[in-house]
Image (cartoon, rainbow, N blue to C red):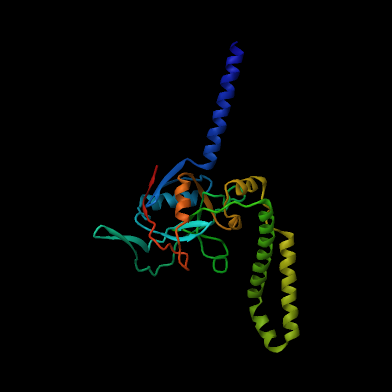
Amino acid sequence: MKRAFFTLILAFTLLVACNDSRRDAIGTTEVIIETSEGDIVVRLYDDTPLHRDNFIRNVKAGVYDGILFNRIVPDMVIQAGDTTLKVKSEGGNSEQHEEPATSEHSPTLSAEIIYPRHFHKQGALAAAREPDSINPRKESSALQWYIVTGSKYSATQLAELQATLYEAKVAALFESLQRQHAEEIAQLKATDHAAHQDLLNRLQVEAEETMAKNPPRPFNEVQKQAYSKIGGAPHLDGEYTVFGEVVDGMPIALRIGRTPVDARERPRKAVSIKRIRIN
């Protein structure tokens, strides 16, 4: 009888320990984003400490209080963190206004891309950044972030996307090689058309062979299940630092994601962040 009792206690202890370990692995810091549409609660990951601590500092400093969601890409992401876009209240009415941007270079953080453990499932919280052409190290903005609102993908769509991403990476590598040989390419283009074309062909082959040796990681079963059941933005995987996830209020994020936008992907109506606070 005692042996059975202690066995039960041990099993329960192990179960709790596993649950605590899983929670610790994900993170314990929860942040409440109070928006004009309702509250969104996110949990910050502990294995991306630079981004976690930076976000907490910004929150405690009130950096995001009163700003607007500055970018919405339908069925993909809602983005905030542009501190030049704030809600201005006059006579009880709220309107959108833009403050003068500072001349200082936007601060950045070193990338903490932990892929495929953290990927762009619906609800993922990630850092925005400048494109690879000017930011090859994929450094994150220290201010701007986004929440993924992407739709579901079938197995066929994921396979097609995988092929498209492969070709895109080959094209990006080809462009990089062209930049490295820019002077030679320009000279041959002006003096020897055949040699110019031969060089481009060789660079294309080099790009294809290089990518074939180190192809993009295929979507694993966890990703496939998430993208098919809840949705996301799989084309962003491995390219941006994911540093948290929504644990409550996802319907609010999806509602914000349905806000009409203009040609610049700016919301046509002001959707604001009243404040963000540590839970």
Percent position (x, y) of residue 136?
Answer: 58, 65
Question: Residue 173: where, in percent of width, then height?
Answer: 66, 67
Left or right of residue 149: residue 188: right
Residue at position x 52%, y 64% in the image: 130
Q: Quadrant location of residue 178?
A: bottom right
Please give the name of the residue rendered at 69% of the width and 55% of the height, measured from the top-left corner: 159
- On screen, residue 266 versus residue 200, left or right, reads left
The location of residue 107, given as percent across then percent down, is: 44, 62
- In the image, residue 121 sits, relative to residue 267, either above or below, namely above
- Residue nearest the viewer, comparing 49 with 239: 239
The residue depicted at 55 percent of the width and 33 percent of the height is: 19
Q: Is residue 189 above or below residue 218?
A: below
Q: Residue at x 54, y 50 (%)?
A: 122
106 or 97: nearer the viewer? 97
Farthest residue to the left: give it: 91
Position of residue 11 measured from the top left corner of the image (x, y, whole percent) = 59, 23
The quadrant of the rendering that contains the C terminus is: top left
Residue 260, quarter of the rendered image: bottom left
Q: Quadrant of the N terminus?
A: top right
| Lateral position of residue 202 relative to residue 257, left or right | right
Please, which residue is most extreme toward the top here? Answer: 1
- Is residue 141 shown above or below 8? below
Q: Is residue 208 left or right of residue 261?
A: right
